Amino acid sequence: MESYGNKIKTGLILEGGALRGLFSAGVMDVMLENGIQFDGMIGVSAGAAFGCNFKSKQAGRVIRYNKRFAHDWRFFSLRSLMVTGNLFGAEFCYHTMPDELDIFDVETYDANPMEFWTVSTDVETGTPFYHRSMKAGYECYEWIRSSASMPIVSKLVEVGGHKFLDGGVSDSIPLVFFQQKGFARNVIVLTHPIGYVKNQIPMFTFIKRLLRKYPLFAQAMQDRPRMYNEQLAYVREQEEAGKVLVIRPKTELPVSHLTHNRRKMQSVYDAGREVAWEGLSRLRRFLAK
């Protein structure tokens, strides 16, 4: 078991799920408010977009800006998709908003020694690409955007010499990767309740046609349900062995992926806070082992 001297490396792993990620934001805010820290964290898709605020220690920021801009077409809308090619406006969400409208705390992010990793999917190979961002700024935000860019409704993100889309396509729950990087005691935040099973995407033949320029990425999308369900089985095995602690919703959340409804946003966020508060003592004991 790898460690820093005698200290075992702890990790926080966040899956995606678009606005279901507000559940994870609620969990993280309770952690921040109670001084819970990790040696590293890795986020996938919404897990990356929201998780960076844990490194910048900005409790409350995620739910605040999601509700504030819920009806701003530049944030996410069909109009944004038609005008910019991205359902979630790339320039607005990843640059204008954090730089001008709801300021991202770059100084705190950079000073925090916690490692921050993102997962993106290389569209030409269909394989996951893991990037470590220790300094905030334009390129860091582009890596986060590449992890969170949903297929079909997002343009390809070119960063680091590769073309990327949603990291959840190729590695939805990167527990194995983090274990390989030496993080031996991991907390995993999932956005579905226990017993969830992912099924094949409806109309996949049509989607595959749209992605014909990137057949390996299309194949990864087709394989995703099997991959995800196998990852859930491994997480469950590790959980039963006491090697990971899993935080998950008690029931299905009131949003499948997207919503403009501020009340539903708050409900998802509050569900995360409730579960985190209820499990806070257990979390402390797990991290103190």
Image (tube, rainbow, N blue to C red):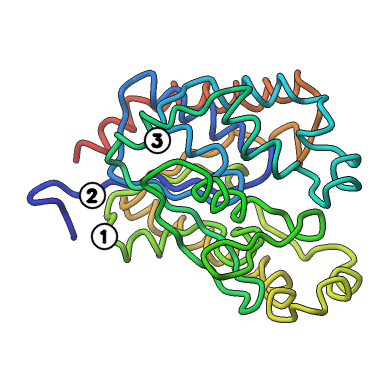
Q: Name the residue under label 3.
A: 55
Label pair 1/3, CB-CB below 8 angstroms: no
Determine whether the residue tagged by mark 2 lies in a helix, strand or loop. Answer: loop
Q: Residues within 10 Å of mark 3 (few under 14, many from 20)?
A: many
- Which residue is at 75% across, 41% downward? 89
Q: In this view, does 146 lie above or below 37?
A: below
Q: Name the residue under label 1.
A: 182
Q: Which of marks 1 and 3 is nearer the N terminus?
A: 3
Residue farthest toward the left in the current orientation of the protein: 5
Determine whether the residue tagged by mark 3 lies in a helix, strand or loop. Answer: helix
Q: Name the residue under label 2.
A: 9
Work out whether residue 180 or residue 66 is closer to the camera in this orientation and state it. 66
Residue 179 in the image, given as x and y percentages of width and height: 33, 61
Q: Earlier in the sequence, mark 2 or mark 3?
A: 2
Label pair 1/2, CB-CB below 8 angstroms: yes
Residue 25 in the image, given as x and y percentages of width and height: 54, 31
- Front tag of 2 and 3: 3
Residue 239 in the image, given as x and y percentages of width and height: 39, 51
Q: Is residue 165 left or right of residue 140?
A: right
- How far is mark 1 from mark 2, CA to CA? 7 Å
Amino acid type shown at disc 3: Lys
